Amino acid sequence: MPTPAVAANAYAALSRLGDQAANLGRDASSSENGLNFSAILKDAMTAVTAAGRKSDAQAQAVAVGKANMIDVVTAVAESETAVQALVSVRDRVIAAYEDILKMPI
C-alpha cells in the first residue's frame, strides 16, 4: 500500500491535469493556447511513464548497490499509484463516452 505522501503527490499531479481540463471549457481559444485534451492526455501519459522509468532506475541502482531499498519501494509505490489513477481516469472517460452514445438524437 502506498504511503500517504506518495499518494498525495500522485493525486496532486492528477489535480493539476484536472485543472487544465477544466480550463478547456472556459476558454474558447484553448487550442490557440496549446491547451487541449490530447495535450493533457499526453502529459498524463508522460507522467506515468516517467514514474515507471524512475522506478526502474531505482531498482537497477539497488542491484549494483548504489541506492537504498526504501527509495526503490517509494518509486515503485509512486509508479503504482500513478498507473492506478490513470486507469481510473480512463474508466471514467470510457463511461462518459458510453453515456454519450446512449443519448437520443
Image (cartoon, grey):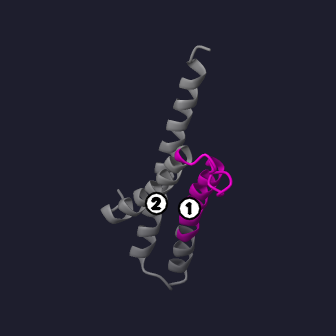
The quarter of the displayed image where residue 25 is located: top right
Task: For mark 2, give the secondary structure.
Answer: helix
The residue indicated by pointer 1 is 47
Number of residues whose C-alpha sits closer than 10 Å to that of mark 2, classed few (under 14), some (14–19) or many (20 or more): some
The quarter of the displayed image where residue 64 is located: bottom right
Q: Is most of the magenta stretch helix, strand or loop?
A: helix
Placement of the N terminus among the 4 image quadrants: bottom left
Measured along the vertical axis of the image, is residue 25 above or below residue 95? below
Q: Position of residue 22 (x, y in %)?
A: 49, 47
Q: Left or right? Give the position of 75 relative to 94.
A: left
Q: Amino acid at mark 1?
A: Ala
Measured along the vertical axis of the image, is residue 26 above or below residue 93? below
Q: Position of residue 73 (x, y in %)?
A: 42, 68
Residue furthest to the bottom in view is 66
Which residue is at a point 57% across and 25% down the rendered structure image?
A: 100
| Residue closer to the observer: 27 or 60 | 27
Which residue is at a point 64% across and 54% down the rendered structure image?
A: 39
Q: How many numbered dots are placed on residues in this image?
A: 2
Measured along the vertical axis of the image, is residue 19 above or below residue 55? above
Q: Decide: marks 2, 1 in contact (CB < 8 A)? A: yes
| Residue closer to the observer: 58 or 21 | 21
Mark sitting on residue 13: 2
Task: For mark 1, give the secondary structure.
Answer: helix
- Assess whether residue 53 is covered by the magenta stretch: yes
Q: Amino acid at mark 2?
A: Ala
Which residue is at a point 41% across and 60% down the rendered structure image?
A: 12
| Residue closer to the observer: 63 or 86 | 86
**How many angstroms separate mark 2 from mark 1 (CA)?**
8 Å
Q: Which residues are magenta?
A: 26-54
Number of residues whose C-alpha sits closer than 10 Å to that of mark 1, classed few (under 14), some (14–19) or many (20 or more): some
Residue furthest to the right in view is 32
